[in-house]
Amino acid sequence: MKITFPHLGNTYICVKSIFDDLGIDYVIPPFNNKKALELGTRYVSEMVCLPLKINIGNYIQAYEMGADTILMAGGCGPCRFGYYAQLHQEILRDAGYDMEIITLEAVYGIRDLLGRVKKIMPDNGAYVKLPGVIRRAVEIAKRTDELEMLTFRLRAREQAPGSVDGIYHDFKENALKTSGTRGMLKLLDDTGEKLGSVSLKPDAKPLKVGIVGEIYTGIEQFASFEIQEKLGRMGVEADRKVTVSNWIIEHMLKKGLHLPRDQSYAEAAKPWLGTMIGGHAQETVGNTVLYAEKGYDGVIQIFPFSCMPEIVAESLLPYIERDLGIPVLTLIIDEMTGEAGYMTRVEAFIDMLEKRRERVKYEGGWELSWN
Amino acid sequence: MRTKIGIPRSLFYYKFIPFWAGFFSGLGAEVVVSGPTNKLILDNGVKSCVDEACLPVKLYFGHVLELKDKADFILVPRFTSISRKEYVCPEFGGLPDVIRHSLKGLPPLITTEINLRRSGKGGIDAAIEMAAEIGVDRKKAATAYKQALEVQREKGGSFAMDDYFGNEAKEPSPRSTQLQVAVIGHPYNIYDRYISMDLLGKLKKYGIGIKTIEMVEENEINKQAAYLKKPMFWYYGRAAYGAAVHLASSGEIDGMICVTSFGCGVDSFVNDLIERRIRKEYRIPLIIMTIDEHSGEAGFNTRLEAFVDMLQWRRANENYISTSG
């Protein structure tokens, strides 16, 4: 059995280190690429959402590298993600790729979940190591996300353009060569140190933009044309609350153990969206409000075309924009999205934010255009 | 004067109007339903709603606007779930919030959450809450709820079709072709004469018999839906899949038309699963007809005609093998 899994940002770093420690045989699909998307759009019906298409591309590319089993997360709706694995299975079978999909989900209870875990565990006494590995893996997930957020802050302030990109690129490459959770933690330490030594502009006051929206297009840089990195290169500091580690810690561990969870976004969303409706709509609405309260310059919402929960959030954002005075740009992505047109919109939005900041600086309300 | 409760002729109207009409009259209120969809209603809806929303949601906005000055309350419930362990679409769950923020000058909205996911008691809880909104006590609400549930049981399944064809439905359909077609789609799409471009009426004119999801017994639906290893967590998804496969396997139908509104997330999965299963296991022609606010009727008719022609040729020539090789 050779296991593979779909890409989602830096998730591969965490998953790889777990598999290494437990001695599970695996293949990491090539980083998301045009070919993967092309394979996805070839086999998946048009109206299905973008992440599923890219996932299929990952699986087929991994199949060609020898993978026969897919490990992925599941869910119980109402967002379509909960049914991904079932549709994946049908599509792969019809396309002639014989792969088994194992979903890690507790929809049928804990005993069933443990049965699924057992399927992928090798018979080498790996169970003894499991608690320690999981503890370190959660640590890795958390620190990888922190590292990514740090690059967003540094990129907007670096003296020499490209210095952060260089270190971060090396990190992603080296992660593929590093083995085990302990090795990965060491790599994170080293990378953190390198990033700490990047020289920054002392007087930089970058624009601050919050990224909200659907989780896959937010986290997976390929799906959003690396918007967060591009913003950084434009001297804009991006922030994103929805991360893999946040999802693992808040939605899996704390929910499973019935610990109190961070509900600040739900509270903030309440006047606009009264309840959880599925997907990340509540996070999108709530975090937009929180960004406005924290004095961010703007918010960018990203979601795949036809994403149901995000459409609800999109309908509500104009009223938050109006009531709290924070500009919002909505970007909708599918396989037909052209990068040039997309970037033009982002640049225009950033220009507008810059002008807006100047306007505020001159105090006297509206600044006239000939000033 | 009796309180007027406005109910938009859209979305769950086609499923639950017998219940709602019964319930609110039981409470002593008067029910006002918006008129049948027309161009103005659709245009008003499209204007006040985001582009990405699906056609029926846009239409819902139009119907709510239509009731603006005609009712004391408008019923815009938050549909989270109408069956155990299953959801409705996320867009429905957010409707009250979106309507409240984007449409101005509306009478008070009744936005009670309807959630039967965990327990069937969610129904009566919602009913009591709704009654409280218009100032009616629990006891009266409970009685009205029970009576309305009876009406729903009796009429719920056939109401939409009867309403669609009016008196025509009572007469036997001509069935000159002896063909029968399954029309698989959300009730709010296929029973709305305007947005479905009168698909059902057109099929009837061709003399084709119609089967819809509502005509399939619940246990038959569940029997077929059990084929899916993981139960589908959308109410509509299970019903559509189960009904489509049941109809295909029963030999009652000669073709299947799946009607979907552009960008419908649930349909994108359900129709794909139906199509894969039907193509693999049954020799039944299947067409997916997509509708949205830009759909032109001529193009729609052409596709429908071609499909019907094909069914007829198939029936006539199925056993014909050319002797000329």
Image (cartoon, coloured by chain):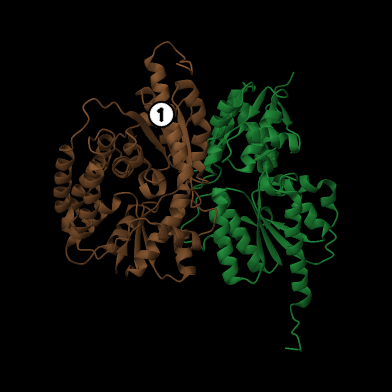
Residue A164 vs residue A274, the one in the foreground: A164
Q: Is residue B153 left or right of residue B114?
A: right
Screen quadrant of the N terminus of chain B: top right
Screen quadrant of the C terminus of chain B: bottom right
Secondary structure beneath disc 1?
strand
Residue B138 vs residue A150, the one in the foreground: A150
Disc 1 marks which amino acid?
Answer: Gly
Q: Residue at x 24, y 39 (%)?
A: A146
Q: Is residue B213 left or right of residue B310?
A: left
Q: Residue at x 36, y 23 (%)?
A: A295
Is any part of residue A59 visible from this angle? yes
Q: Is residue B254 left or right of residue B227?
A: right
Residue B158 vs residue A128, the one in the foreground: A128
As drawn, A337 above or below B247: above
User: Where, by quadrant of the figure, is residue B155 drawn?
Assistant: top right
Disc 1 marks which residue?
A: A298
What tint does the image give chain A?
brown
Residue neighbourhood size for the residue with mark 1, other residues' Cα within 10 Å, grouped as few (<14), some (14–19), many (≥20): many
Q: Percent position (x, y) of residue B234?
A: 53, 49
Q: Residue at x 68, y 22 (%)?
A: B72
Q: How many numbered dots are placed on residues in this image?
A: 1
Tell me the subunit letter for badge 1.
Answer: A
Q: Percent position (x, y) of residue A253?
A: 29, 43
As drawn, A123 above or below A351: below
What tint does the image give chain B?
green
Is any part of residue B23 visible from this angle? no
Q: Percent position (x, y) of residue A316?
A: 51, 31
